């Protein structure tokens, strides 16, 4: 499903070139649950941005379901992203003036789904993460764990094959973190592909594969 071959990403800083990714080759099959770990500045975010079609490689190949991502136009890239990938962020990225239900329904607005159907689907998505009772709450009226569950419901609303999560438990206490990992494990059991960045070994341990990045290279890749 995901095939990176010799991918580099460079940033030009004055006279010098920073290799955020220095020639990464990586395959991730449909249904895998992979954690990406590594020290700060090692290239994890850059790798996630490329995998998530938020950014393109400087060189090398990224094939997603056989499609070469580098050759897509900006519109095609955005379309691929919206159709295939759900994102979960450390800071939840919810809109503060919208209720849980409205936040979850938002991707359906962009997809042109009619309002009644939108709210119905969003309510179902919230029920699946155990938040049906909280659907009219604003993000500020929810705990961190509840906010992240809203974000997960939003990430899943278009039924993406791949979920990309960047430090999904980075702002959560232990109990909420475990609740979030339970949800990810359930999604994995349902066959969804999950790629998660974390620097916490306890959290990485939930994944079935741990990919370690250092200085823009994959230095370890272990399956359980
Ligand atoms: P991580 O997510 O592991 O902390 P990043 O992917 O954010 O690592 O960064 C990898 C390297 O690329 C770092 O040296 C960082 O300073 C550099 N980098 C990332 N983004 C940019 C950017 N927009 N401009 C310049 N350098 C960047
Ligand atoms: P739950 O029934 O999901 O266990 P809690 O008993 O944890 O909910 O929370 C009760 C109420 O307090 C909820 O409406 C929730 O929004 C709010 N709440 C819980 N934890 C926090 C928090 N850390 N910050 C703000 N509000 C919170």
Image (cartoon, rainbow, N blue to C red):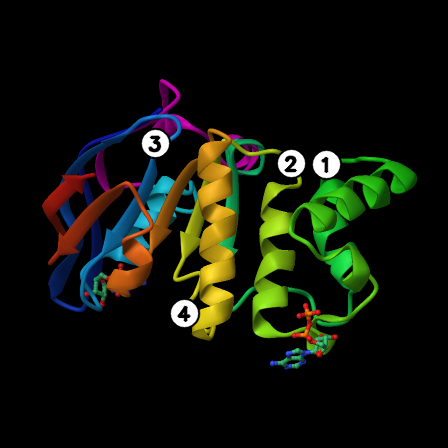
Which residue occupies the foreground of this view, 65 or 208? 208
As helix, strand or loop, the secondary structure at mark 2 comes to: loop
Task: Give the crowd class for mark 1: few <14, some 14-19, many >=20 residues within 10 Å.
Answer: few
Is residue 41 inside the magenta stretch?
Answer: no
Is residue 106 at all visible to an observer of this figure?
no
Mark before the other along the chain sequence, 1 or 4: 1
Is residue 67 inside the magenta stretch?
Answer: yes
Using the rendered view, name the quadrant where residue 156 is placed.
top right
Which residue occupies the foreground of this view, 14 or 38? 38
Measuring 11% from the left and 64% from the top, which residue is drawn there?
16
Q: Which of labels 1 and 3 is toward the front?
A: 1
x and y, in percent, of residue 79 in the image:
57, 33
Which residue occupies the foreground of this view, 158 or 150? 150
Please report contact status of discs 3 and 2: CB closer than 8 Å, yes or no: no
Task: Report the residue that reaches farthest toward the left.
Answer: 219
Magenta residue span: 57-79
Task: Give the crowd class for mark 3: few <14, some 14-19, many >=20 residues within 10 Å.
Answer: some
Q: Name the residue under label 3.
A: 70
Q: Gap between marks 4 and 2, in whole Å?
A: 25 Å
Q: Mark 4 points at which residue?
A: 170
């Amino acid at each position: 499903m995901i095939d990176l071959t010799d991918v580099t990403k460079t940033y030009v800083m004055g006279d010098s070139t920073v290799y955020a990714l220095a020639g990464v080759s990586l395959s991730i099959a449909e249904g895998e649950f992979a954690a990406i770990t590594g020290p700060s500045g090692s290239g994890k975010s850059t790798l996630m941005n490329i995998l998530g079609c938020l950014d393109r490689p400087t060189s090398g190949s990224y094939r997603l379901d056989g499609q070469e991502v580098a050759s897509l136009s900006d519109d095609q890239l955005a379309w691929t992203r919206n159709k295939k990938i759900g994102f979960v962020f450390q800071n939840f990225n919810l809109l503060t003036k919208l209720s849980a239900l409205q936040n979850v329904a938002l991707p359906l607005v962009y997809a042109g789904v009619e309002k009644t159907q939108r709210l119905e689907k969003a309510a179902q998505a919230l029920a699946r993460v155990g938040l049906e009772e909280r659907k009219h709450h604003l993000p500020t009226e929810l705990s961190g764990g509840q906010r992240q569950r809203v974000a997960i419901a939003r990430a899943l609303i278009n039924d993406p094959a791949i979920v990309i999560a960047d430090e999904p438990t980075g702002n959560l206490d232990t109990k909420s973190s475990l609740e979030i990992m339970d949800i990810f494990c359930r999604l994995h059991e349902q066959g969804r592909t999950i790629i998660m960045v974390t620097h916490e070994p306890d959290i990485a341990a939930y994944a079935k594969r741990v990919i370690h990045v250092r200085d823009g290279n994959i230095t370890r890749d272990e399956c359980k």
